Image (cartoon, rainbow, N blue to C red):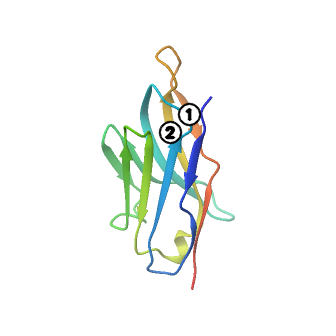
Amino acid sequence: QVQLLESGGGLVQPGGSLTLSCAASRMIFSINHMGWYRQAPGKEREMVAQITSGLTNYADSVKGRFTISRDNAENTVYLQMNSLKPEDTAVYYCHAILKIGPATPWSSYWGQGTQVTVSS
């Protein structure tokens, strides 16, 4: 099995920046897709940013403020968050679709979540 290990959450003032990281806990044969989702209290989980084969996709609410990137050698995905707003407050989850080995199926994995709080 594999775990997605997230880090980088915390408390930041409005207008500030944070960078989230998500790394696989072991060597992976192949990763097709990685992304970040978030869930605020009382709301459904929503897609924030995705990266697949180098192509990126963002939620309208974060376009121009957030940047997703991936380090293929380290099986790590990052989310650079700038100009943070109180409405960005949520638990952020990492997601990946990957193959652990050449004979294993593509499978979906989620991280445990990291809290981001934007408040003065």
Residue occupying image coordinates x 60% and y 38%: 3
Is disc 1 placed on a helix, strand or loop? strand
Residue 12's spot in the image, x, y percent?
A: 53, 76
Residue 82's spot in the image, x, y percent?
A: 40, 70
Label number found at residue 96: 2
Quadrant of the image for the C terminus? Answer: bottom right
Residue occupying image coordinates x 33% and y 66%: 64
Residue occupying image coordinates x 56% and y 56%: 7
Residue where numbered disc 1 is placed: 108
Residue occupying image coordinates x 42% and y 40%: 74
Cβ–Cβ under 8 Å for marks 2 and 1: yes
Could you say which quadrant of the image residue 89 lies in?
bottom right
Q: Is residue 55 above or below residue 108?
A: below
The answer for how far apart the CA atoms under marks 2 and 1 are is 6 Å
Is disc 2 placed on a helix, strand or loop? strand
What residue type is disc 2 on?
Ala
Label number found at residue 116: none
Q: Is residue 42 left or right of residue 32?
A: right
Q: Is residue 46 visible?
A: no
Which of these two is toward me, 117 or 75? 75
Is disc 1 surrounded by few (<14), some (14 to 19) or many (20+) residues within 10 Å? few
